[in-house]
């Protein structure tokens, strides 16, 4: 095709294509929606058992994606093309790829990738698993196996394909901005949409009236409820109003009028309505007796569903024929086994996890089923296949077993001839009576020894491989077809061979066979595997590097070579390398470049985009990696054919993203960082706790007081104060709104540009540290102080208004905040009283904070501290013993746990502990506290103990820590032992008894305020 | 095509077709709209000078068209396909007809008609002229030349084509119900839409909350205003909210929550907003300097616009060549002239009117331009052509004229030789000085007589025919192209021949020529007219009956023949016959039938549908027309080819309409008429005057009191009371909601079914009489009484709250009501005091009615009465003389006017009047009223007059009417004359003067309370 298709031609072609594949062509909805998913043709029709294949355009409105028409590919309105295939036709990816061919996209020339992307619409109670489809790095489609809608599990599952038409057309026409798209051969996208886009952005961001929108929301919700209250419920009218609620919510959100609490509440309200609508729709269809269920049983013969059938049916027939062959001619020599589970693209993490699981599970599986293996290879795989290879015995070994029969005296008659009972037993065991002998376990009975022949490996495998596959666990799994099997992604084929024979079984609706598939770039051709011994060779011939280790080293080699060619270096990044390795079957690294001018952008921005968004390897100068080069390395899934095209595509994507970032950066730096503060007033934090600006003010007020607690003063204090003032300002900048993960990073950057000192800028950055496990800790005191003020403010405020996390719900990430507090304080070189700090935080809250709340927060933080300490490898009893006393001071607690743990290693630990424990146990339940009165008791053991106690008490009082305590308890140990040996504590004489108990009580009390040793094992 | 297209195939084909014709393919809008017109791709883009060709699907929502899915073709959601061509490409009808061919509709097999339909959207300030397109009687498309939007005149005009896709698909698939449509080859329309349709109907009619909708409207309006208040205005966001206002208004209307006042107010509010949006959009484009204006100048070469060019250009060239020929070879013999103005289908009324105008204008035109005509034929024409034929002289006659020159004494010098002045004059007149002679008008001057040769007719005609065409006036005219010419519908070609020569001129962007076009059925082929003499013959050969009289008699003959074949008769119906004659070029009557079961429906329903909706001739039994036969006659525009197909189509349409009516009828008759009363409570009449139920209650209360005024009692009164109770109930029935013109008719019908007496039923019907000029008058007293109560209630109530009609605005049709009062009362055999009746009406109003209001209502009714009497042919002075006194009693007023008018015809009228007038004039300005005192004056003339006055006064007092008065005045005439002759009224003696003035005053006062003769001409 010489001239690329216009926008409208793409739409028309897609309609034609999907109509020819049996889809009903539907129309965009007449209520503003954020996505085609919300159109009742998707949201309702995916529910229930009835088949439904539909395709339609959906101009989709996402107010907060608007950029006033200034962005090359972000708009508040973009155009989707939505396809629903229900049930899964078995080959939806292939149908989709064919549709791209129709648009003129030759898959051999491009890198088309399915990159994990799980979709969730909390307001609709809907989610699914699937991918973003990447075309030379550009996300062009969302491909989802829809698992749930309106809170109802979908059965059958629907395949949802959502094309981003704007993106595809930009790609086809090779234009850099959506606004340059040729719409109809005459007008551009800008001609027809730009003014409206700008106006809608102004409306959405600047003029939409919050109060009126809130009223509209309420009215819509009431109408939805009233439609649902009708008998029978009015499904579509109610759904229409939910959509209006949803759009209105989006507008309110864009206006910054929705804080996290309100968001949660709005979502819950919408989800509840969506659930009711979904339920009502299902009931309606049920009352109608699912009229379409039968229809398509017939019509599927000629529609979407049919296209995949021949392939599957073919497999099934061939395996059945082979089964018979197998039964007849099973060899008994050790032989090669291969299992390949062919899937749609597995998420990178799931691939790693599956291989790890199989590494253990496969040898165990063979052992369990008594299949001896000469060699078991480490499991291998690619995004589209998991493979096991081993050399196994052709049969299980034979076994001898003995069965117990009737009592001897009942087995033979007087003449010694076998009775009927013996004959019956022999017959039942398939032997003759003459084979019977006394049972070896108990010779009052007869028995028989039998040899059980081992079963052929092929039968054992055929029977049990399904449960091996079923044993694989994934973080999130999905269903896709009538088998109801769950897996990471759909299983589409299985190769199972023992030597040259198919091991016949069926799993997840797929029959095993000898046909694998080639690469996506090659069109996934069928490849027949003659024998298990040829498997690796066959894949190699298909250019598939099936062993991850080999792939990884290939990639490493390629990127090193490329980097050195341009004088750059690629730093080690094992996580990225593993992910990239797991995204390709046939890796070919390529060198991409971007305009040098973008190097002026903050490095973190450049790297974030390359790594997180695009999975590119950033490249630094060989001598100084911190100085980036205007290059990147991408790893294509495919060979080097048309690598220039793929490179061009990836460069375009990166350019667009950098143009985006540059736009934000230029806009942001037109004003000083401090000037963004007022705008925080438009961002709701929580309705009772005010705006983000209120919160920033609280942190500003709190920081110097926290600084006081750690003894900061002078310049250091001034730095902390200034940084506290500015620490949240970057949240109002475009860059951070776009790349949330750059909060703090941009704060530092923009602070420096605005002329703040290095120290202030650094503190702004550091107050977020550590952001995740293993992240850097804050290096400056100012960073520590602001980080604490930030987190403690959040914890106290939200707990005070009853928003402590419950169950798994933690919308404000308070667990993360508490963990941050713990990590920061543990790293500090001194004690820090949480209670004191929390009381200061309480004073700046706009709500009353009860003492109980502070207790709760301390307990909550202690919970995180306990996890941290356990993760560090300490015994739970050591941790609990210390935390029972030291929860208020994480730093102190951590060092005390370390001390206690060390003591627990001492050889005399048990002796010391048990003698001390005796003191505690004997006095634990006493109500009365007795005075120290050793004058009454003249026993030497008592005097000795008393004397030793006095010394110990003084030491412990002087330094109340675990080490001192334990040292003293060690010293007391013998005295305690002697005391209990020589003296009857519970003397008849009451005075005597009270005196002795008093002494024991005092010894027991030595640990008070230091550690609760009763929590220790063996106490 | 063996298998008809599915619904979605029709959509896809239309998209492809219009895309290939250069249209941009747009998407349905994401806000609920009543029509594709409201999509900004139409509403905004038709504004301003920029070209725009677009096509798109638009699912359109009209809540009050919903029928709970029970109707075969009425739904609250139907699917439009909208096309906008801007500017008019010159051949939009042809492009449209070609699109039908693409859908498989062969125009030779069908009757495709363009039937006048003028479109108006008051809420959008938009209107246009055009047609419904009928396909074998089925309305499938709305075709409009869009003249105005948002109150702004459109320049250029846009062509708007709105396909009713559902209808077209029903036709293609030959299904009787929209629900049976095959949507995609697999599912039906019912499958995908029915449940939703039913639910939306329940929501729209039954559950939508009026209060909440009202609030939404207010919020939307406020947001629209705020978007418009932004600088610059946010056009599209504002438009979106106007659309939401409009949809919400429709819902409120469907819920019956909008009375006429509110409707007017809502419309005004929406229109005002629409105007602001339109203005803002235009200003925006202007600021952008209309970026598309240039673009299409280029691109039009290959798009829509081009397709029509060759034809027009061709015409132009050929006419230019002919012009030269004409100049050279004009003959001078009387010769045949023909002018054919080829148009798109003229409305039936406009065709009649144009022919009528030309009948006068054409002869005058020839006379004015001095073209002698041997024969001028009556103008003829069809919907697509207006034609003039005459035999005219080839040249104007020559003329002799005389011009006045300089004074004689300045013309010749002393030698008698012509001066320079004379030479100059001669030269100026193109003669030699020797031709000069004394000017015949005044021989002090010289002059010259010249012969002016008549110009060739062809030149005169070429010069002046444009103004003849321009002189045609129509009720509503339209513009369509850059010429700015207005006409009833676009002019597309012109034939103008004098003998075999083209009369060359251009009008409305079209050049005259010799090419006419054949019938639509034949594809409007070009037909060359060799000579004016061949014109009629050529049209005849093309099967076009161009003479309306001939067409009408053809039709009459055809329908008579068909009727007699089935034993039926068609009553004379000149209006219908004229309309049908004006809808066709080639009439072919056909016999259609409908199921006998529908004869059970009320006859008025059947006839209304046949005549008003379909322009069919209903057929009655020959012996009794009031008994309908299950047949109708339609007149096809075309020949008899495939007449069965056309018949089938027309029958289907009628069947669908009757099925509709039957459905309403069955539903309506499930309950008694009285049971519909409560539902009137949901219909707002006027917010201050309550619901229609309140109004019905007022009529019920008022009727017996009005009955009292005309002396009704006993059974007659009871009938009136019962009928008054029920008279408005039918307004709540489905049938009347659907066919408003059947109000009263259905009331009668349903009353009888409910078991009411004949008399009650008849009174219900009659209270609306007369409904229009020339309609029946009510025959029963009960009908009269209720009719008066109904109208007087409305007049008093609405005047009381200040809603008297102003200017041309009369939303409650109060003029019609007043006229009804007048017509009914004139027909009554007795007097009736409006004031008394209005006071009774005032007593039942929910608002206070001032006396002034009653005066205003009486004056308002009098205004109608005056018009009625003038229409009856009475002299205005007679009418005014009587009405000055008798406005309160229309019946009396009418008979008095008749009497006065008769008197005015009497030979002695002037004498009687003038003598009496003398009495009036002489005393008119006197402040004082003098007593009768004739004893003072002994003059015999005085005594005579006094004696005659006394007798007359007694007579007039006994019977105070015009006849008595005039008889007596006639008797007094001589006495008055003598009195003034013999007696000096203004005597010097004061007593004498007072006595004489007193007598004259008394005579003058004789007419008081009877007639104000001072209003009479000649008084």
Image (spheres, coloured by chain):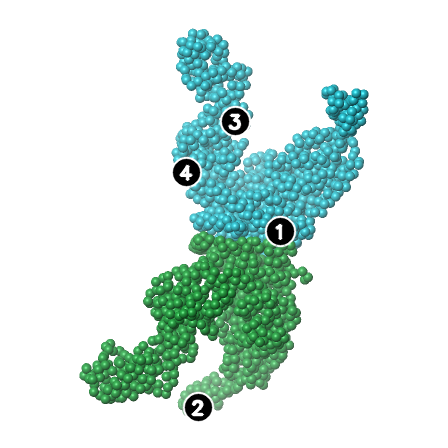
Chain colours: A green, B cyan
Q: Secondary structure at mark 1?
A: loop
Residue located farthest toward the front when viewing the structure as drawn: A714
* Mark 3 vs mark 2, CA separation in Å: 135 Å
Q: Secondary structure at mark 3?
A: helix
**Is B772 on the left or on the right of B106, as rendered?**
left
Q: Secondary structure at mark 4?
A: helix
Callout in the foreground (1, 2): 1
Asked if A270 appears above or below A773 in the picture, the reply is above
* Mark 1 vs mark 2, CA separation in Å: 104 Å
The earlier-in-sequence mark between 4 and 3 is 4
Judging from the image, mark 4 belongs to the subunit labelled: B
Residue at 54 percent across and 67 percent down: it is A602
Residue B825 image position (x, y, % from top left): 47, 29
Q: Which residue is mark 3?
A: B869
Residue at 47 percent across and 49 percent down: it is B222
Residue at 55 percent across and 37 percent down: it is B627
The earlier-in-sequence mark between 4 and 1 is 1
Callout in the foreground (1, 3): 1
Q: Which quadrant of the figure has residue B939?
A: top left
Q: Which residue is mark 2?
A: A440
Residue B634 image position (x, y, % from top left): 62, 41
Residue at 64 percent across and 49 percent down: it is B293
* Mark 4 vs mark 2, CA separation in Å: 110 Å
* Mark 4 vs mark 1, CA separation in Å: 62 Å
Q: Are marks 4 and 3 in contact (CB under 8 Å)?
A: no
Residue B597 image position (x, y, % from top left): 54, 44
Q: Which residue is mark 1?
A: B291
Badge number at residue B697: 4
């Amino acid at each position: 095709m010489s001239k690329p298709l216009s926008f409208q031609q793409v739409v028309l072609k897609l309609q034609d294509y999907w109509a020819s594949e049996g889809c009903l062509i539907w129309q965009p909805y007449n209520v503003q929606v954020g996505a085609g998913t919300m159109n009742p043709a998707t949201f309702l029709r995916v529910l229930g058992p009835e088949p439904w294949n539909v395709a339609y355009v959906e101009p989709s409105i996402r107010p907060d994606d608007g950029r006033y028409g200034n962005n090359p590919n972000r708009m508040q309105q973009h155009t989707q093309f939505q396809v629903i295939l229900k049930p899964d036709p078995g080959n939806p990816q292939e149908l989709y790829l064919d549709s791209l061919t129709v648009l003129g996209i030759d898959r051999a020339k491009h890198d088309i990738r399915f990159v994990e992307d799980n979709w969730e619409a909390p307001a609709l109670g809907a989610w699914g698993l699937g991918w973003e489809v990447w075309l030379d790095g550009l996300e062009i489609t969302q491909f989802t196996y829809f698992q749930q809608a309106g809170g109802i599990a979908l059965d059958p599952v629907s395949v949802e394909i959502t094309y981003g038409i704007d993106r595809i057309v930009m790609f086809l026409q090779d234009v850099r901005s959506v606004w340059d798209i040729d719409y109809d051969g005459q007008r551009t996208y800008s001609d027809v949409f730009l003014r409206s886009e700008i106006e809608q952005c102004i409306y959405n961001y600047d003029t939409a009236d919050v109060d009126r929108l809130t009223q509209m929301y309420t009215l819509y919700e009431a109408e939805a409820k009233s439609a649902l209250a009708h008998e029978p419920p009015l499904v579509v009218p109610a759904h229409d109003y939910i959509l209006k609620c949803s759009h209105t919510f989006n507008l309110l959100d864009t206006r910054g009028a929705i804080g996290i609490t309100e968001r949660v509440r709005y979502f819950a309200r919408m989800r509840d309505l969506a659930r009711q609508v979904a339920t009502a729709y299902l009931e309606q269809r049920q009352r109608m007796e699912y009229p379409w269920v039968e229809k398509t049983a017939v019509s599927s013969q000629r529609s979407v569903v049919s296209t995949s059938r021949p392939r599957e049916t073919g497999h099934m027939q061939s395996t059945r024929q082979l089964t018979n062959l197998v039964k007849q001619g099973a060899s008994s020599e050790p032989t090669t086994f291969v299992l390949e589970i062919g899937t749609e693209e597995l998420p990178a993490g799931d691939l790693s996890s599956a291989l790890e699981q199989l590494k253990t599970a496969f040898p165990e599986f063979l052992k369990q089923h008594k299949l001896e293996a000469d060699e078991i290879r480490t499991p291998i795989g690619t995004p589209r296949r998991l493979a096991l290879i081993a050399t196994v015995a052709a049969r299980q070994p034979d076994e001898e077993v003995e069965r117990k029969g009737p009592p001897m005296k009942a087995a033979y008659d007087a003449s010694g001839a076998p009775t009927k009972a013996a004959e019956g037993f022999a017959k039942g065991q398939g032997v003759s009576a003459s084979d019977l002998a006394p049972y070896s376990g108990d010779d009052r009975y007869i028995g028989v020894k039998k040899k059980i022949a081992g079963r052929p490996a092929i039968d054992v495998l055929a029977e049990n491989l399904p449960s091996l596959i079923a044993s694989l666990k994934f973080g999130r799994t999905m269903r896709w077809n009538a088998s109801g099997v769950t897996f990471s992604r759909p299983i589409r084929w299985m190769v199972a061979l023992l030597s040259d024979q198919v091991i016949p079984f069926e799993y997840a609706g797929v029959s095993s066979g000898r046909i694998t598939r080639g690469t996506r770039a090659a069109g996934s051709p069928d490849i027949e595997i003659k024998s298990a011994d040829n498997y690796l060779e066959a894949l190699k011939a298909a250019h598939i590097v099936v062993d991850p280790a080999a792939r990884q080293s290939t990639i490493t080699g390629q990127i090193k070579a490329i980097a050195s060619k341009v004088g750059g270096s690629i730093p080690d990044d094992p996580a990225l390398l593993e992910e990239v390795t797991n995204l390709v079957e046939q890796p070919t690294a390529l060198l991409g470049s971007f305009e040098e001018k973008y190097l002026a952008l903050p490095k973190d921005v450049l790297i974030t985009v390359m790594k997180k968004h695009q999975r590119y390897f950033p490249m630094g100068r060989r001598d100084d990696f911190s100085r980036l080069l205007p290059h990147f390395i991408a790893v294509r899934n495919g060979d080097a054919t048309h690598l220039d095209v793929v490179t061009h595509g990836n460069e375009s994507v990166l350019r667009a993203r950098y143009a985006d970032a540059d736009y934000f950066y230029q806009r942001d730096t037109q004003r000083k960082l401090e000037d963004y503060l007022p705008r925080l007033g438009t961002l709701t934090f929580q309705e009772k706790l005010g705006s983000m600006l209120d919160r920033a003010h609280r942190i500003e007020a709190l920081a110097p007081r926290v600084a006081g607690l750690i003894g900061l003063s002078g310049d250091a204090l001034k730095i902390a104060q200034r940084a506290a003032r500015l620490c949240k300002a970057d949240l109002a900048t475009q860059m951070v709104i776009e790349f949330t993960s750059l909060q703090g990073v941009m704060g530092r950057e923009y602070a420096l540009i605005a002329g703040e000192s290095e120290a202030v800028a650094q503190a702004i950055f550091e107050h977020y540290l550590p952001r995740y496990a293993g992240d850097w800790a804050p290096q400056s005191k100012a960073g520590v102080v602001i980080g604490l003020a930030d987190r403690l403010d959040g914890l106290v405020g939200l707990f005070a208004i009853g928003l402590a996390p419950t169950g798994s719900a933690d919308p404000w990430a308070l667990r993360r905040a508490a963990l941050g507090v713990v990590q920061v304080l543990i790293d500090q070189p001194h004690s820090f009283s949480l209670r004191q700090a929390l009381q200061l935080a309480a004073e700046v809250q706009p709500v009353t904070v009860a003492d109980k709340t502070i207790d709760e927060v301390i307990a909550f933080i202690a919970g995180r501290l306990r996890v941290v300490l356990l993760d560090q490898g300490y015994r739970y009893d050591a941790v609990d013993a210390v935390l029972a006393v030291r929860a208020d001071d994480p730093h102190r607690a951590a060092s005390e746990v370390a001390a206690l743990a060390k003591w627990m290693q001492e050889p005399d630990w048990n002796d010391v502990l048990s003698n001390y424990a005796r003191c505690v146990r004997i006095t634990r339940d006493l109500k009365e506290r007795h005075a120290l009165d050793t004058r009454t008791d003249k026993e030497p053991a008592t005097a000795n103990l008393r004397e030793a106690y006095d010394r110990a008490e003084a030491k412990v009082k002087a330094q109340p820590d675990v080490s001192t305590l334990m040292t003293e308890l060690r010293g007391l140990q013998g005295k305690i032992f002697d005391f209990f040996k020589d003296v009857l504590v519970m003397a008849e004489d009451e005075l005597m008894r009270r005196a002795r108990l008093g002494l024991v009580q005092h010894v027991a009390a030595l640990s008070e305020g230091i550690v609760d040793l009763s929590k220790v094992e063996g106490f």
